[in-house]
Image: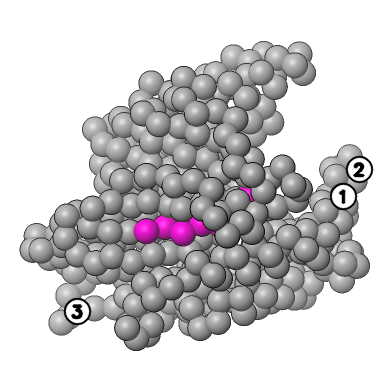
Amino acid sequence: MDRRNFLKVSGMSLAGLSVSEIFTRAASTKHNQKNGSSYSVVLLGDTHFDAHPDTYYHDGYSDPDPVREANHRKEFDNYANMWDSNGPSILKRAACLVDDDTRFVLQLGDIIQGDTGSYEAHTRMLTDAFGKIKSAFGPMTFATVVGNHDIRGLNDDVCRKAYLDFMLPKLSKELGKEITSPNFSIQVGEDAYIFIDFNFPDDDQIFRLLKDTEGARYTFVVMHGPLFPYDSPKYYNWYLHGRKSTDPAAWAAIREAFAKRNAIVLCGHTHCTEFADWYGDGGHITQMTFNSVWKGKAQSVYEPGATKPEEYGNIAKEGLKKSGKNPQKAEDHFKLIRPGLKGYTIARAAGSYKMNVTPDGVTVDFYAGDDARRSTRFILR
């Protein structure tokens, strides 16, 4: 099959129809959940590309908080070391997952470490990271979504501009349509992939993209951070419309809209391999979190730290207890989701993933580290 015909993007028309009309017509005829095409997508989580010496990308960078500055400097060294060994190994393993039915490769944000001191350095880091990952997959279409590190630096506004100036033209070329915003959608067969800027959520655009893609067989929401709270004592409130953009009403409205579409949320950010299957708001949301930050041997083995819905939130609460803080602060977030969970697992494992999309369902095969054998399979639908 000709790879050029694999990817159909939502900006293209069919006999003059609008995107919404294409999806609606597909849904009203033969393209329901039990019909249509089968294909695969190869996925990578956070990659945090970096390299030695730190002056190459980070010259001129500083942070007003000396503790945070020191932590970031450690990260530069850790991720540069990772890209001297494990990073290329994950890319090589992931490339082996590509086969004749693979439509594209998807990376879930934080493609770079960021923390640069200038527009030029940030662009250079993006150029090198994109080139390295793209070259591992040859002519295969490659897409990514904006993460928090992708726009982080001495001046975040400058780094965000560098990211958008670099990445939007790249995505336009890869996807065959003009991408003018970090919020956009593509169509793959009968399915919709909605990309969302997690850092600056624009609810109007999110609802518009949902409207434009009505009638899709499966709706995949692609964003760097999670929709559901992350089980962490430090970051339990860092989810869509949490933390800096705290807005419980906005989060509930987005969650309900995703549920009504029975959305499958694909995200990164947490450096975990996590699966949450949730029913509520009159629908069904499955959230899968991907991780390709492989720092040590322990992450090359899939060993879940929790395997039951009732365990969701325990890591955060226990961590807060140990540090002498009130665990109820975290519980107030998790209790909103826990009752609707029908399946839940979380593991620190890192690696590469292959998502199999068929008329009968959606599964994700996970390969920890660079293991040739599948570590586990997640059933998303």
Pick the residue in front: 381 or 235: 381
Q: Please name the residue that numbered disc 2 is placed on.
A: 66
Q: Amino acid at mark 2?
A: Pro
Identify the residue at horizontal 90%, vertical 46% (top origin): 70
- Kindly state the secondary structure of the residue where label 3 is placed: loop
Q: Please name the residue that numbered disc 3 is placed on.
A: 14
Identify the residue at horizontal 38%, vertical 21% (top origin): 339
In the rendered image of this protein, does residue 59 appear above or below residue 286?
below
Task: Tell me: 128 left or right of 193.
Answer: right
| Of pointers 1 and 2, the one earlier in the residue sequence | 2
Magenta-colored span: 350-356
| Of pointers 1 and 3, the one earlier in the residue sequence | 3
In the rendered image, the residue lying farthest to the left is 29
Q: Residues within 10 Å of mark 2 (few under 14, many from 20)?
A: few
Give yes or no for residue 354 being in the magenta stretch.
yes
Pick the residue in front: 352 or 175: 352
Q: Please name the residue that numbered disc 1 is placed on.
A: 74
Q: Amino acid at mark 3?
A: Leu
Q: Mark 3 and mark 2 in contact? Answer it, CB < 8 Å.
A: no
**Percent x, y of residue 151:** 67, 59
